[in-house]
Image (cartoon, rainbow, N blue to C red):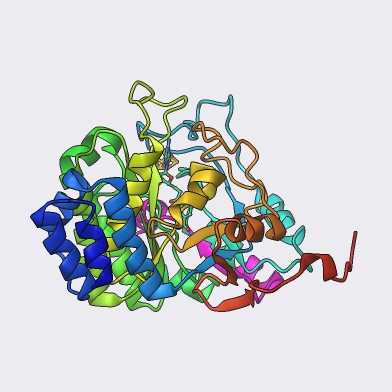
Amino acid sequence: MALLKLLENMSPGPELLSIAAKVIKGERISPGEGLLLYEKGDAGFLGTLANYVREKKHGDHTYFNRNFHIEPTNICVFDCKFCSYSRLLKQKEGSWELSEQQMLDIVKSYEGQPVTEVHIVGGVHPKLGLDFFAGLLNKIRTMRPDLHIKAFTAVELEYMFRKAGVTYDEGLKIFKKNGLNSLPGGGAEIFDDKVRNEICEDKCTSEQWLEIHETAHRNGIPSNATMLYGHIESYANRIDHMERLRQLQDRTSGFNTFIPLKFRNKDNQMSHIAETGVTEDLRNYAVARIYLDNFAHIKAYWPMIGRTTAQLSLSFGVDDIDGTIDDSTKIYTMAGSEEQEPKLSTRQLVELIRNVKRHPIERDTLYGVVKDYKDHDFEKETVISA
Ligand code: V47
Ligand code: SF4
């Protein structure tokens, strides 16, 4: 109860204090209480409470992984207003489309390297369908039996399955048989229909997104969940989004992690909307950590928010800062992230975490420990190759 006393000294008022008392007792808070946190909680109060939840779950352990991205194409049939990355099929300038061989060459270039995950996600190309991607998964699986393949957002899957005339269950089973291990969290944006219709009206609906993830979980394919925030949505919309995820997680326990994605405004149809500041970003991580009591992990995606905010987020409920990435994703550099060449070595990631007095742990996709870096001395490492 020392924590409650500390929070009381911040004079947050009786409503927030009673929410804090519930959280400290391990009780679930209601949507109305979540909304109050957004509306009335300052960064100090929310950070202190979220850090309590984070440390109760993970102590000061902070996870990262070694992964690389493949972005097959940025040609997309959809027209999300926040997207700086996609191009229409007829729009040749700035577009790319990798052949199967080019993607396999990317996988080959990591041969012998201790990466544990490939993250495959891109635009929704009208001509690349289920058969093409099942073949690609199969070949990657044959080349690297050990690699975890995290691939395709629910938006890509809904389009491919619809065009191929298969159910979500059938399509996911085909992909699983060919090597798919988990789904990334993209495409969730904001579930509220009114907001969704304004920012991305033509792609999969919220119900379809949730159904695809639920079907994946029931087929033993875990997944991540995201929320695109800081544009035209309200705090009530953010709580509604997290509430739908919390309910699905209660049913399946299939989500690994929740990743809030801050809207970046460069070169897209929503460029007139100002971006949120760091304080709001940190408050948002904190509310997510407090609200999503059945999610084990909250991830800050450093290529999007930058290294310094990622470090700060570790005191606001975040316990994971994603991976080494290796400059293999363009989605945020094109949208205006401060990280124009997103590349961090394992040593740099470990130091980033150590510098804010946390305990770095390399994980695999499912949060199995690959290596504990608490006492690791990089100076004593044997150099095997140049
Ligand atoms: O769905 C697109 C977002 C998502 C912008 O699962 C933007 O481990 C901000 O989901 N500003 C795709 N965000 C990326 C994604 C992701 C990223 C990292 C890790 C994982 C994971 C998933 O990117 C899209 C959309 O929500 N996005 N444009 C933008 N201008
Ligand atoms: Fe296409 Fe995804 Fe961009 Fe939407 S966010 S336009 S689905 S690439």
User: Can the viewer see residue 379 in this picture?
Assistant: yes
Above-or-below relation of 331 to 56? above
x, y percentage for residue 134?
A: 53, 64
Between residue 279 and residue 274, name the one nearer to us.
Answer: 279
Q: Nearer the viewer, residue 275 or 66?
A: 275
**Is residue 31 rendered to the left or right of residue 267?**
left
Instruction: Classify the position of ligand 2 by quadrant: top left, top right, bottom left or bottom right.
Output: top left
From the top left corner, tell me how far across and down residue 226 is, in percent. 36, 54
Residue farthest toward the top in the current orientation of the protein: 272
Range of residues picked out in magenta: 138-166
Q: Residue at horizontal 42%, vertical 29%?
A: 265
Residue 162 magenta-highlighted? yes
Q: Is residue 347 magenta?
A: no
Q: Quadrant of the N terminus?
A: bottom left
- Quick check: 110 left or right of 383? left
Q: Nearer the viewer, residue 243 or 214?
A: 243
User: Residue 92, percent across and down?
Assistant: 57, 26
| Residue drawn where x is 23% and y is 52% of the image | 10
Q: Residue at x 68, y 74 (%)?
A: 375
Q: Where is residue 154? Give x, y as percent.
A: 37, 56
Quarter of the image for residue 354 reads bottom right
Q: How many marks?
A: 0
Q: Is residue 317 above or below residue 267?
A: below
